[in-house]
Image (spheres, rainbow, N blue to C red):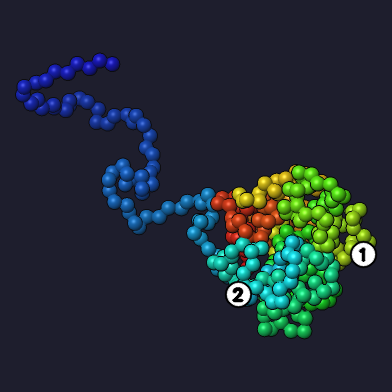
Amino acid sequence: MDIAVEYLDNRVDIIEPLDAPRECAAAASSSSVTAIGKTLLTGESVDTNSTRKLEAEIDFSLYDSCSCKSKPRPCVFVHGLGIKRDMPRNRDRFYYWGDLDGHAPCCTSMTYAYLNTSGNPWTSDTLQEKVCNRVMAVSHTSTNSVIADTIVVTHSMGNLMLAGAIANKKCSLDSSSTWVGLAGPMRGSMCSDFIQDSCAGRTTAVLETVAEATGKCPPTTGLKSLPIQGGPHSSAELDAAYTAAQEAYRDNVYAVMCGENYTGLVSLYQSIFWMLGKTVPHKSKRNDGMVEFTSCAAGIPESKFGNSYRDRFYRTKLNHFDMEFVSGDALIDEAKMPVKWFECLL
């Protein structure tokens, strides 16, 4: 479009035509704007008395924290497979576990059992008695083999050790105590079967990768005690011990975290669990790289599990090591927030 412009020497007043319509037809419909939008358009200050109702995309910020909703108590952590010696007392720090400082509002203290799980089967009477002793040591009200006023957190084989101890009446949980179970191989692990099948005097690249997480050949006593229930490396006696431990677990555990996808959090060990998930002949693709979801659930109905850190029974996309809290949380994926789950659980 061409526009012709003529400059005049004198000012000309434009008079409104008397016969023109008073209103013009609307060329565009009006649109509502927010208080901030009005400020940007008009330059006026924001009305601090106005409110907006917005739906949050996610319902917490990175800086939100949870407070303790139950009774604060001492917390004791029981590890799984891979430790080669005993310590006579619980420790204040242990590399096996991630740092939960600031994320354990219900823990008045945090101590860590340190037991020889490589050289002992989970069914060992001695090992189960030591678990009871370590757990009972953190609360002054625990007496006569009854664990009182204590939060017990168990990972992997540690779940079987405590469940076996309860099933064998070596100790029991008082109603004032809370048991939190993480990644328990309550029906065994195919990693045990795989290592036992593969350690017949030969080494492969796959086996060496698996060994990074489970230990080198020959398989340890602890690992050999974890074959799949009912499988070729199990026995009638071990199958019965599994069944008793599962019943004790279901009757006593308060909250459970299990993995159904071994992708896990970004970490130095992530690739190891990708390899485990793809090469170990798990019975199900739903596993944390070492333990299948159904083994971890131990007969607890799957309908109880949810994939959010808000769920008491937490179905995650974490690998086996992630559930030791060693790699923190994902930023957005609620199925990868083990630390947040523990912080908000009790």
Q: Which of marks 1 and 2 is nearer the N terminus?
A: 2
What residue is drawn where x is 82% and y is 57%? Answer: 219
Amino acid on which the number 2 mark rests in the picture: Ser
Q: What crowding class fits label 1: few (fewer than 14 Cα within 10 Å), some (14-19), or many (20 or more)?
A: few
59 lies left or right of 118:
left
Q: Residue shown at 84%/59% (left/top)? A: 224
Residue under label 1, please give it. Answer: 237
Rendered image: mark on residue 139: none
Residue at the spot of label 2 = 109
Q: Quadrant of the N terminus?
A: top left
Relative to 125, is 7 on the left or the right? left
Q: Quadrant of residue 305?
A: bottom right
Does residue 332 appear in the picture of this structure? Answer: yes
Q: Is residue 237 left or right of residue 216?
A: right
Q: Residue at x 60, y 74 (%)?
A: 109
Tally the marks: 2
Taking depth in this image into account, of 141 and 93 the one nearest to the observer is 93
Q: Where is residue 340 in the image (x, y as percent from the top left)?
A: 59, 60
Nearest to the observer: residue 287 or residue 50: 287
Give how far apart the Cα atoms at labels 1 and 2 are.
38 Å
Q: Where is residue 188 in the image (x, y as percent from the top left)?
A: 82, 57
The residue type indicated by label 1 comes to Glu
- Residues 333 and 24: in front is 333
Residue at 5 percent across and 24 percent down: it is: 10
Q: What element carries label 1?
A: helix
Seen in the picture, residue 157 relative to 317 is either above or below; the reply is below
Relative to 41, residue 127 above or below: below
